[in-house]
Image (cartoon, grey):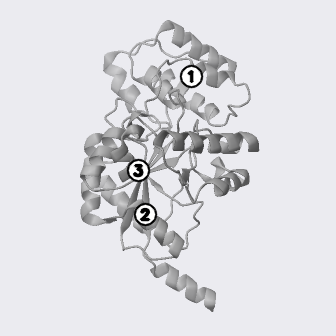
Amino acid sequence: MRNFIYKTRKALWPKLVILCYHRIENYMSDPVKITVSNNNFLKQINFLKEFANIIKPDQLFESLKKRKNLPRRSVLLTFDDGYSSYKQTMDLLLKESISAIFFISLRKEKYWWDILTKILFENQDVEKFNCNKINNLLDEIGYHFKIEERISPKLMDTLCKWSVSDKTFPFNRNKAFYFLAKEMEDIDPYKKNKMLDIVTSLSNEKRNFSYLLKKKLIEYHTIGCHTINHYNLSKLSYENQKKEIELGKKELESLIGSQVELFAYPFGNRYHYNFDTLEIVKRNFNFAFSNFEGLVHKDSNIYEIPRFLVRDWDIDNFVLNIKRFFKH
């Protein structure tokens, strides 16, 4: 009977939708569908201000610590990965009086998916040297086809609009991205891995974290850890998971000059971390965020807080999805 009463009351508790964004900027191609254009983001924010109660991170923490209900239709914004466009995003949200959580991975080299996107989709021509590197890599891992060195201007739109969720490959470049992505997510980078080394060597660009030195922005928003390199933690040994998580926390705290109490699992589904991960995270952080769908309430697991991933939806699709999230 007590269990029935608890479940009945729980069903009536106000629920929180936590939105998970990644990168906010205009883009040419985004095969992994994690970027939201500037225009769509502005429209999404304006809708949320009218439709929902956009809460501050501290309101969530107080609710979970003290088991207090949040206002109805509560929404919290979070951002993963640590892109250089965060400076503009932080500035915009500050002007709108919206405080968000930004989870930062301090990897110095660009992410492999960003390197491959730029080479395969954002240029008509792939340099001969890079083309040979990619073709040789594909051959070594069992995919015997070659990418196009040149795509005509008329076909670039078809190439760029493709995503990994599509079931067809208009060009070998799309096919190459799909199969390389499939292999890359499952590797243990701490074991000598030629594939990761080759993909990383395709770009000399370094990531920029200068926004973390903007004291006004860092004090207004909340900064969380997202490991050092954004690896799939479930593929790593206990010691290497510990290194990724604890070193990520230490370096981030040193950079921003304050304690980091929040963590977000890279990739974030349940199969991307394990019991070892949870043990290490619980020793180092007060709260941890996942990336599987679910509403948050005052009795939610504080080390597997669910979130809803936001895509580059126009306002009509965004409204439909927000309403769907609240019915989850």
Dot 2 or dot 1: first in sequence order is 2
Q: Amino acid at mark 3?
A: Val
Residue underneath mark 1? 200
Identify which residue is drawn at 47% across, 77% down: 68
Tag 2 and tag 1, C-beta contact below 8 Å = no
Amino acid carrying label 1: it is: Thr
Q: Quadrant of residue 215?
A: top left
Q: Nearer the viewer, residue 82 or 159?
A: 82
Circle nearer the N terminus (1, 3): 1
Identify the disc placed on residue 58.
2
Q: Residue furthest top?
A: 128
**Disc 1 element:** helix
Given this view, does label 2 or label 1 mark the residue nearer the observer?
A: 2
The residue carrying pointer 3 sits among few (fewer than 14), some (14 to 19) or many (20 or more) residues within 10 Å by Cα, namely some
- Give the farthest residue toward the bottom: 1
Q: Where does the image place residue 156, in percent across and percent down from the top left?
A: 35, 22
Can residue 277 be seen here? The reply is yes
Spatial distance from mark 3 to mark 2, Cα to Cα? Answer: 22 Å
Q: Label 2 sits on what residue type?
A: Asp
167 up-or-down from 307: above or below: above
Write down the residue under mark 3: 310
Q: CA distance from mark 1 to mark 3?
A: 27 Å
